[in-house]
Image (spheres, rainbow, N blue to C red):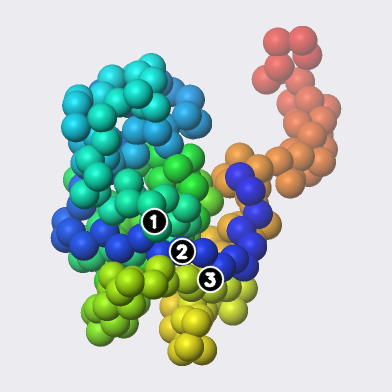
Amino acid sequence: MKAFKQFCAVVAPLDRINVDTDAILPKQFMKSISKFGYGDYLFDNWRYLDEGQPGDDCSIRPINLQFVLNQPRFRSAEILLCRDNFGCGSSREHAPWALRDFGIKALISTSFADIFYGNCLKNGVLPIVLTKDEVDHLFTLATSDVPLRLVVDLAAQTIVQPSGVVHHFEIDAFRKNCLILGLDEISLSLTHADAVRLYESMRRTTEPWLFQDG
């Protein structure tokens, strides 16, 4: 997992409530157990006019020009602005993998489904919860003629508008630290590798019958 750094990026407004994980990444793309390679299929049923399948060459598929991420000014967006209850439905971890692979670094909403929220944090995508008034205000800015760019600062737990208006957000201190350091749960465990090896060596000495070569 890459370390999460402060960044400034274009915001894409997805003005739909209750966006579920099957909309984020449809079920047919869950056949793979790889953690990478899903970006082309993000919001597949909304981005394309045909039904996609794993392995499709998405560069030749007909696209829905009305969908926000297909509009030229939002194609480079790294922040997705969402409505209530984003990420509801199944607990598939493939959904945040698809968002990450597409290039989305942060999500902003009034609320996220609990499991989806946790899966995002474990995979390098920052879900940010703001008040309804704040989200409504950002939607107004993001849907104007000029693309909205926001500065996301995880260390300071702030979002800064071009006007200088600052929005503060909360995040669990442990998850925040893992994102900043770029540590998923496996990487975090490996930071204690020396202690694990020392413990295993001690167990071999004190309880050799537990080991086949003891």
Task: Give the mark toward the camera: 3 or 2.
Answer: 2
The answer for how far apart the CA atoms under marks 1 and 3 are is 17 Å
Q: Residue at x 40, y 68 (%)?
A: 147
Q: Is residue 79 above or below residue 211?
A: below
Question: Looking at this rendering, what residue extends furthest in the top direction?
Answer: 213
Q: Closer to the N terminus: mark 2 or mark 1? A: 2
Residue 28 position, x and y percent, is 26, 23
Q: Is residue 140 above or below residue 102?
A: below
Q: Closer to the N terminus: mark 1 or mark 3? A: 1
Q: Would you call the spot at circle 3 few (<14 residues within 10 Å), some (14-19), or many (20 or more)?
A: many
Tag 1, which secondary structure? helix
Q: Residue at x 44, y 83 (%)?
A: 167
Tag 3, which secondary structure? strand
Question: Looking at this rendering, what residue extends furthest in the left direction?
Answer: 17
Q: Residue at x 64, y 62 (%)?
A: 5
- Residue type beneath disc 1: Phe
Which residue in the protein does label 1 denote? Answer: 74
Which residue in the protein does label 2 denote? Answer: 10
- Residue type beneath disc 2: Val
User: Quarter-wise, where is residue 200 in the image?
Assistant: top right
Residue 109 position, x and y percent, is 31, 67
Which residue in the protein does label 3 denote? Answer: 152
- The residue nearer to you, when weighing 167 against 202, is 167
Q: Residue at x 47, y 81 (%)?
A: 161
